[in-house]
Image (cartoon, grey):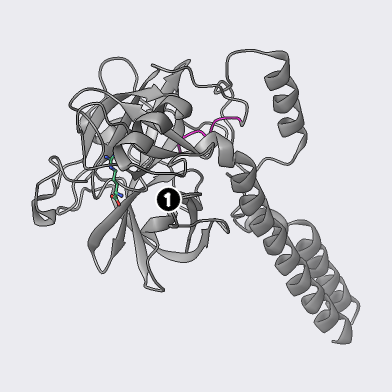
Amino acid sequence: MASRMAGSLRLLLWLLLLWPQLGADPGDAVTPPSARGPPSPKSETLMEEATQKPEVLPRGCGQRRIIGGQPAPERKWPWQVSLQVRGRHVCGGSLISSWWVMTAAHCILDIVDYTVKLGDTHLKHEAPGAVAVPVKDIVVHQKFTRIGGLYNDIALVLLSFPVKYTTHIQPVCLPTNALQLAAGTQCWVTGWGKTREDDKPENEPTELQEADVNIVEYRSCNKILKKALKAIQNPVDKGGLCAYVDGKDSCQGDSGGPLVCEFNNTWVQVGIVSWGIGCARKGIPGVYSNVGFYKDWIVRVLSRSTRWDTAGLLISRLCLLLLLASW
Ligand code: ARG
């Protein structure tokens, strides 16, 4: 009797103290240590506030894990993912934590079963370290709209299980909301989208492509696009940013993919491929969702899921406790 009591007590103690450490937490995601904007008193305060909150984003993000030399192409963009439906690439995306992938809202078409393919630069062959993870949940920005353009074009994809980081699978860093991107900053966009505007979708490349493009301030971008579209409304708002370089651009099939810039050896995702007028047309920039603008929303979604997880864990533990007590 006494030993049975001691056994139950030990089990109880184990459940109460040790169990939380055993469960993986979808809220393990992070902000880069170095991905802050140009130092200004304002951004310092924002950083401080951010560090006081529980961290939902990963610490060692934005690293290529290459020691010296040039990274092998398959290790160059380890956060790039392909969002797929029945084995077919539909959009790009980026890994922001072991549980979460970021993409464009317009990529989420319907209630279909999505899979995320990670750790591979080739769409057709399976690299040894590649993994395909089913999607558990998708959070589309509540203000996403296609009316008069694409606005709030951002979605977060929760994986069914967390991925293990490897040399081929790494999370990208997110900027602070205070990050001020100077016009002309050189950044990179990656994806499996069309390499020419008039290419047929079946001619999309199977190898991951990259292009360096320069940041265009959204107001000047607005002017160009408004004129080109003969629009009354501003085609790009503060939630958008543009990038342009003569002859290079993202294109159909690249949507949802990352636009990243390197700051102090850390790669930070500043944009999500959203839309454009054709592809790589002279003088016409490509439009991206401005990740920094949505940083608070992203952190809120990620920490909300953590809270629900913790609540679920507590409830299940309480049930077990009651069961043990009645036993
Ligand atoms: N909307 C396209 C997609 O779904 C992306 C187009 C980007 N276009 C551009 N010119 N940058 O894949």
- Please tell me whether residue 256 is drawn above or below residue 88 in the rendered image: above
Horizontal side, residue 277 vs residue 158: left or right: left
Q: Nearer the viewer, residue 148 or 11?
A: 148
- Going 31% across and 53% down the picture, which residue do you hit? 91
- Going 22% across and 31% down the picture, which residue do you hit? 73
- Quadrant in the picture for the N terminus: bottom right
- Quadrant in the picture for the C terminus: bottom right
- Going 46% across and 29% down the picture, which residue do you hit? 218
Horizontal side, residue 24 vs residue 53: left or right: left
Give the residue number, with chain letter if any, for mark 1: 150
Splitting the image into 4 quarters, where does residue 113 fall? bottom left
How many tags in the picture? 1
Q: Nearer the viewer, residue 12 or 120?
A: 120
Q: Nearer the viewer, residue 124 or 319?
A: 124
Splitting the image into 4 quarters, where does residue 74 fall? top left
- Going 71% across and 69% down the picture, which residue do you hit? 312
Q: Position of residue 165 (x, y in %)?
A: 43, 42
Q: Is residue 175 magenta?
A: yes
Horizontal side, residue 164 vs residue 30: left or right: left
- Please tell me whether residue 118 is drawn above or below residue 309 in the rendered image: above
Q: Position of residue 224 (x, y in %)?
A: 35, 30
Ligand 1 rendered quadrant: top left
Q: Amino acid at mark 1?
A: Leu
Residue 124 visible to the viewer: yes
Task: State whether the magenta stretch is mostly helix, strand or loop.
Answer: loop
Kindly tell me whether mark 1's CB lies below 8 Å from ligand 1. Answer: yes
Numbered range of the magenta stretch? 171-176
Q: Is residue 62 magenta?
A: no
